[in-house]
Image (tube, rainbow, N blue to C red):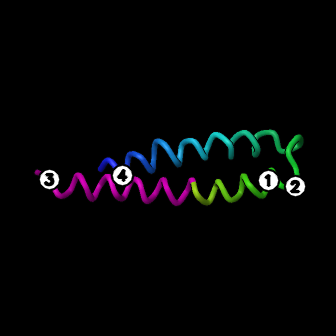
Amino acid sequence: MLWGYFLKMVIADRAGITVDTVYENSQFHMGMYVIVATMFFAIQIYCDFSGYSTIVRGAGTGI
């Protein structure tokens, strides 16, 4: 479960900050900023779903 929380709260949420900043102010960000934000968006989505799945798998095994 800890790995899932790490993926979600550290990687996905921090990538989301950059993605939101660039996409919300797209008139000021062009070129490489948009490319990097798009790659971060893919990382954000992957880590969100992977993190949630890992958390659920960890919770499902029980003690």
Query: Can you identify the residue that label 1 sits on?
Result: 34
Q: Could you tell me which secondary element the residue under label 3 belongs to?
A: loop
Crowdedness near tag 4: few (<14), some (14–19) or many (≥20) residues, C-alpha within 10 Å:
some
Label 1 and label 4: CA atoms lie apart by 29 Å
Q: Are marks 2 and 1 in contact (CB under 8 Å)?
A: yes
Say whether disc 1 or disc 3 marks the residue closer to the N-terminus: 1
Q: In the rendered picture of this protein, how many numbered marks are placed on residues?
A: 4
Query: Can you identify the residue that label 4 sits on?
Result: 3
Query: Can you identify the residue that label 2 sits on?
Result: 31
Which quadrant of the structure image shows residue 27?
top right
Label 2 and label 3: CA atoms lie apart by 48 Å
Q: Could you tell me which secondary element the residue under label 4 belongs to?
A: helix
Q: Which residues are the magenta region? A: 44-63
Q: Amino acid at mark 1?
A: Val
Label 1 and label 3: CA atoms lie apart by 42 Å
Label 2 and label 1: CA atoms lie apart by 6 Å
